[in-house]
Image: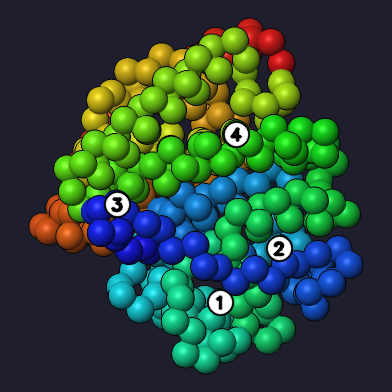
Amino acid sequence: MGAYRSTGEFQRDQRYITTRITADGRDGYPVEPGRYRLVVSRACPWASRAIIVRELLGLQDVLSMGVCGPTHDQRSWTFDLDPGGRDPVLGIERIQDAYFARFPGYERGITVPCVVDVTTGQVVTNDYAQITLDLSTEWTEFHRPGAPQLYPEHLRAEIDEVNDVVFRDVNNGVYRAGFAGTQEAYSSAYERLFDRLDWLSQRLSTRRYLVGGQLTEADIRLFTTLVRFDAVYHGHFKCNRHKLTELPVLWDYARDLFQTPGFGDTVDFEHIKRHYYEVHRDINPSGVVPLGPDLSGWQLPHSRADLPS
């Protein structure tokens, strides 16, 4: 997942396979219905982005999806949810097999989400940030009627700007707090995280969505961290100035998205909790998984629809 600087700061390994699947096939992988399989885990926030985008755009019939279990070992995510522990399309037990099929001895992270070429059994890409953008911009021929424009050209500069600060301080910020190796590194990450959450609360107090008055990629990227906040990050990662439920604007905003088809119906809180609390034994040596929090609040009404859009 990452390494530590000498200062004790967590540093995410961001060396990904950057091959792209495009409408013109310029990287050797053209968009084709049925050719590729999106491999995810519902536990992983980075993979959850791809699950949500696939649902919102209506790509289920042209891009199949394999789901790994919520836990993994040092080697790889596994298909332990499937009969016989094998993905029914790819026929493999571990996603590492698809990585090794293309890059024998692959030494970087075996991560989800990734996209696998079913015809060869080889991984195409695990560049999670680009995967969702390409689903929005390169797979347009196969979007459902009325699909949202999650990355419209006229908003891309602002979306990219928001995504950059949200990734640095929130998406990755919770990890920088949770895996900090020194008090100083933790304190820095903690302050940056909650400063950014305060900034987001202010931004969202007068608008329903983050950019342009419409649902975009920026909202999806923030949501996958917010939906895990009270279940995992508040306690497990020591991000405990406030719970999400104690931040009125962000709590309303998160519920608005959760209740939107394609968001909450793709979330599995049991998978989320099992992954973090069982896998991160350096933080939680016992592997005991908390029973809470109470999840009933996610269906409470919100007033976000009354905001300007």
Q: Which residue is mark 2?
A: 63
- In the image, what residue type sits under mark 3? Glu
Picture layout, residue 19 above or below residue 130? below
The spot of residue 183 in percent (x, y) is 17, 43
Residue 47 visible in rendering: yes
Q: Disc 3 or disc 4, which is closer to the eye?
A: 3
**Sequence-first tag of 4 and 1:** 1
Residue plotted at (36% across, 63% down): 2
**Sequence-first tag of 2 and 3:** 3
Q: Disc 2 or disc 4, which is closer to the eye?
A: 4
Picture layout, residue 80 above or below residue 145? below
Residue plotted at (71% across, 63% down): 63
**Sequence-first tag of 2 and 4:** 2
Q: Which residue is mark 4?
A: 162
Q: State the CA–CA distance, disc 4 to disc 1.
A: 38 Å
Q: Which residue is mark 3?
A: 9
Q: In the image, is 209 to the left or to the right of 282? A: right
Quadrant of the image for the N terminus?
A: bottom left
Q: State the CA–CA distance, disc 2 to disc 4.
A: 28 Å
Mark seen at residue 88:
1
Quadrant of the image for the C terminus?
A: top right
**Sequence-first tag of 3 and 4:** 3
**Sequence-first tag of 3 and 1:** 3
Element at label 3: loop
Q: Residue furthest bottom?
A: 104
Crowd around label 1: few <14 · some 14–19 · many ≥20 (10 Å): few
The spot of residue 52 in percent (x, y) is 60, 46
Crowd around label 3: few <14 · some 14–19 · many ≥20 (10 Å): many
Q: Disc 4 or disc 1, which is closer to the eye?
A: 4
Residue plotted at (50% across, 23% down): 200
The spot of residue 157 in percent (x, y) is 73, 37
